[in-house]
Amino acid sequence: MTDNADRSGYGRPLPARLDPRAGAPSRRDRRAAARTDRAERAQDRPRRGRRRAVAAGRLVTAAASVALLAGSGWGWYLGQVADASMNRTDAIPDSGNEGLGDAMNLLLVGSDSRAGATDAELDLLNTTENDGTNTDTMILVHVPADGSEASFVSFPRDSYVQIPGYGWDKLNAAYAYGYFQEADDDATDAERQASGAQLLIKTISSLTGLSIDHYAEVDLLGFFKLSEVVGGVEVNLCAPAKDSYSGVDLPAGPQVLQGEQALAFVRQRHGLDRGDFDRIIRQQTYMAGMIRKLMADDVLLDLGKQRRLVEAAADSVTVDESLKLLDLAAQMQSVQPDSIHFQTVPYIGDDRDSQDRYILRLQEKEALHAFFADLSAEPEPAPGAPAAAPEAPETVAPSEVSVAVYNGSNTSGLAASTAEELTAQGFPVATTGNADSRGYEVTEIRFAAGDEGLAATLAAAVPGAVTVESDEPAAGTLHLVLGSDFNGVGQPVDPPAPVEVVEGEDPRTAADTDCIN
């Protein structure tokens, strides 16, 4: 491990601006803080019953680690290292990222970027250089306000979703649209990365009904370096795994993975019965093992490993501008492995889109919002207590609803004929035109924030059309994007073709060490 760390540069001297002696708390302050901490723990100890002894034992390493990090000069030093050298991006958008609740939501993204990797490192990673705009791993880390548990919800890359401003597409296209389409022509690569992250966050926020507070992105080389510093993670395979695409070559049974085999393990999808779903299980299993490892004495109480881990994260992970890793660690210090749940976003099943591409149909937006709201739900009301029904937006007169009609179907002249129908029903039509060349399967009504009543009025005239809040329309004007399901104003759209219903994945916890496929 030491040799690997030195070759990666983690053992190099720190720059002068990160010298822990410059501005660190005095020895007197550190001793006073330590005495206060010991006194508080002594006062609290009699109130803890014998029944909590086991739980306290499971938390002691995490609590000790946070005490070291937050209440000492060492913690101040690590904080300075992380804050000064962390890669940061302007990932959090100003709009399109709204949600209710006090939970913390972090979007964890795995990028296929190999930027900065040498030829030797590319060979070691069993890959080649690429443009790095694909985000094939997307996980929402959800921590309720009380910090009692945490949920890691994976989003398959082929999930068919509405990308704000771009219509329906695979989820892993959101970052690419932001990177190539949202940024200015003369934008720097860092500005393009920020645009990609922002559009991905808007997409996830709309999908979940949650506000995304933080963003963290790690590329292939970064993951490799982090796994090396941790020193290996134990996984348990039900059968041997061998795949030339990812480079994985592992026997069955429990084993410790790090470096290139850890990366190959979480990348494998070829040769697995369920492809990307089994890859998601691999990723979740590895993260669960890493969490168990980080909570073990030999990591959290090893000051040298703490330093190397923070330096590796600072060198390998890109985060939003406000995320502080030590604050995040403190927020999750009381979460135990059996209270950390891993699952996949609720889905319906496999399907094909209009371009005959494989896609994964997710459950309806209302069901997804309910699923994510349940992650932070308060205790259920007493039996018989009425549930509060959401208020429907008030409709207005059609004459107050200005509509721009765009033809996203394959029927020529549909926008013009629809404009005539809308005008006949009293809707002012601002403009008509074509949407884009990709084609739309579903008719959409896009509206600006605050125009819910206008959208409800138009939705009543186009039964079954999907309403989508978007930054695209100007306030007071709706965009009606006609899909292949459109049958005319006043007529219900065609229902989606039935697909085979597949049950979602059973949740796993970070304490689960059963074998996986």
Image (cartoon, rainbow, N blue to C red):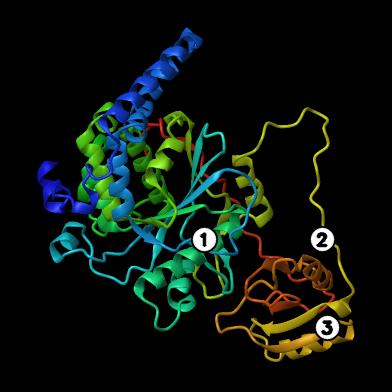
Mark 1 or mark 3: name the one nearer the start of the chain. Answer: 1
- Is residue 31 rendered to the left or right of residue 191? left
Residue 516: horizontal and vertical position, in percent?
Answer: 37, 39
Who is closer to the viewer here, 512 or 384?
384
Residue beneath the point at 31% across and 64% down: 113
Q: Quadrant of the C terminus?
A: top left
Helix, strand or loop for disc 3: helix
Residue 450 placement: quadrant: bottom right
Mark number, residue 201: 1
Helix, strand or loop for disc 1: helix
Report the amino acid beneath label 3. Answer: Leu
Who is closer to the viewer here, 455 or 82?
82
Disc 1 vs disc 3: which is toward the camera?
Answer: 1
Residue 123: horizontal and vertical position, in percent?
Answer: 16, 61
Q: Is residue 279 visible?
A: yes
The residue carrying mark 3 is 422
Mark 2 or mark 3: name the one nearer the start of the chain. Answer: 2
The outermost residue toward the left is 3
Q: Are marks 2 and 3 in contact (CB under 8 Å)?
A: no
The residue carrying mark 2 is 393
- Is residue 489 rendered to the left or right of residue 173? right
Residue 388 placement: quadrant: top right
Report the amino acid beneath label 1. Answer: Ile
